[in-house]
Image: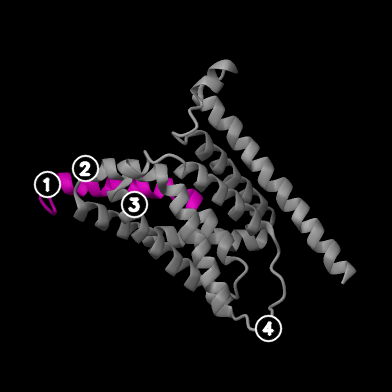
Amino acid sequence: MEFGSAAFVLALIQIIWVNILLSGDNAVVIALAARSLPAHQQKKAIVIGSAAAIVMRIVLTLVAAQLLQLPWLKLIGSLLLLYIGVSLLLPEGEDEAGSSTKDGLMAAIRTILIADLVMSLDNVIAVAAAAMGNTVLLVLGLAISIPLVIFGSTLLLKVIERFPLIVWLGAALLGFIAGELFVNDPALHTEAIEASMGMTHHGAEIAAGIVGAVVVLIIGKIMIARKTTGDQAA
């Protein structure tokens, strides 16, 4: 496939489009992670986090087929997402001695990268298929997507500031994705369980997703209540 040919341009558009469609969840995480930062650092976290996540996604796409067959990978990823979902619900405490705004920025970027890595495990297969083995096409397509992801995350951050309830919806979304990842881990062999319960695999994904969302919301609510009680006692 020659650079600049009609086939190249068409494949490039496909990669950009697929990545945009699959980046909705990632934009939610980026916005949630950046919301607790000072205003002057929010943009920096979104830009650095988005760019680093895209670079990581390029590397992940190149080895996607092999990675997705590793047992326990999705299970571990689902637990990480549950943790991130709960942590994003917790209110930020007062700055402690020795802490700095730089620490908060790095923590936000780290959250973005971990969540993006976990949630991109399945998505990269679609991107890899669109790239058809052309590394230049893959890198160019994902790089062009960076400004679009940044724009979406920035817009969502503004909406979150206006409607805080979206934080809970975003955390529930992470829990839902965690549940889906959990039942898709090849090490679990869920086929027998699904058959005994008369469920399709898609039905099992939805059920596990709902459980994951509920778990995140309940644990988040309990931890917030404990923190509030502790602050009042202090």
Callout 2 touching callout 1 (CB < 8 Å):
yes
Q: Give me the C-alpha separation between circle 1 and circle 4.
A: 57 Å
Disc 3: CA contacts within 10 A as few (<14), some (14-19) or many (>=20): some
Residue 109: numbered disc:
none
The magenta stretch spans which residues? 1-26
Magenta span contains residue 175: no
Callout 2 touching callout 4 (CB < 8 Å):
no
Residue that carries the numbered disc 1 in the rendered image: 1
Where residue 132 appears, as percent x and y from the top left, is: 21, 42
Q: Is residue 192 above or below residue 97?
A: above
Disc 4: CA contacts within 10 A as few (<14), some (14-19) or many (>=20): few
Q: Give me the C-alpha separation between circle 2 and circle 3.
A: 15 Å
Residue that carries the numbered disc 2 in the rendered image: 132
Q: Give me the C-alpha separation between circle 3 and circle 1.
A: 23 Å
Colour scheme used in the picture? one colour
Amino acid beneath label 1: Met
Q: Residue furthest left?
A: 2
Callout 1 touching callout 4 (CB < 8 Å):
no
The residue shown at (63%, 83%) is 98
State the quadrant of the C terminus: bottom right
- The kind of secondary structure the magenta stretch mainly shows is helix
Residue 97: numbered disc:
4
Callout 3 touching callout 1 (CB < 8 Å):
no
